[in-house]
Amino acid sequence: RARAAASPRSVAVAAPGRRDLDYAGLEALCEATARGLHGLGVEAGDRVALIVPDGPEAASAFVSVAACAACGPLNPGLASAEIARQLDELRPRAILLPEDAAAGTVEVARASGAVVVGLAADAAAPAGVFTLGAVWRSKGEPEQDAEFEQGLAIARRAMKTYRNALAELAK
């Protein structure tokens, strides 16, 4: 936050062929991520697993999650059994993974008992920008209840607000 206040237009995340994400945008992404995760029941002391391939979205997702919870990055290239073992050790409240993650990874994540949240990147957006999208409940839980639906609505509004702010910054 100090960097965003001191140099809001300085480059925070860059990638070849993509517009740069500045510190003001990264701070807004961190705030939207925190509101979104909080809306799904993640509190400051909770652990969040991040199973995202290397790239600008992995970097900004790590920073965004670490700003509001304990972030445990896991290697998405591991076998499902190893991911399951690491999730069992980590015991996360939530798991972030790409919306197009392999079915085996999604099933292992859902079996952990955590709320599983899809992370969607937009190649047209600045490097590192993502939104929280699909949410999979853990296996064995009843269908989404009213409280969960309310949290999901909060998460989606937070990300929509962020996308709107980003569009204004791009003008």
Image: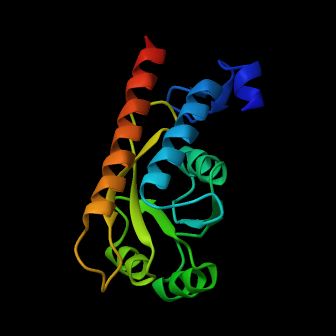
Most distant residue in the left direction: 143
Quadrant in the picture for residue 150:
bottom left
**Looking at the image, how many numbered discs can be counted on the residues?**
0
Residue 151 x, y percent position in the rendering: 36, 55
- The answer to whether one can see residue 128 in this image is no
- Does the image show residue 126? yes
Quadrant location, the C terminus: top left
Give the residue drawn at x 49%, y 67%: 94
Q: Is residue 13 above or below residue 40?
A: above
Residue 148, relative to residue 12: is it above or below? below
Residue drawn at (66%, 26%) of the image? 11
Residue drawn at point x = 45 percent, y = 24 percent: 166
Q: Is residue 11 above or below residue 121?
A: above
Instruction: Answer above or below: position of 88 versus 115.
Output: below
Q: Residue furthest front?
A: 147
* Coloring basis for residues: rainbow
Location of residue 160 in the rendering, given as x and y in whole percent from the top left corner: 35, 35
Q: Quadrant of residue 90?
A: bottom right
Compared across the picture, whether 135 is left or right of 38 comes to: left
Q: Quadrant of residue 14?
A: top right
Quadrant including the N terminus? top right
Q: Which residue sits at x=51%, y=26%? A: 19
Residue 107 image point, x, y percent: 35, 80
Which of 162/109 is in front? 162
Query: What x and y, as percent, mark residue 109?
Result: 43, 76
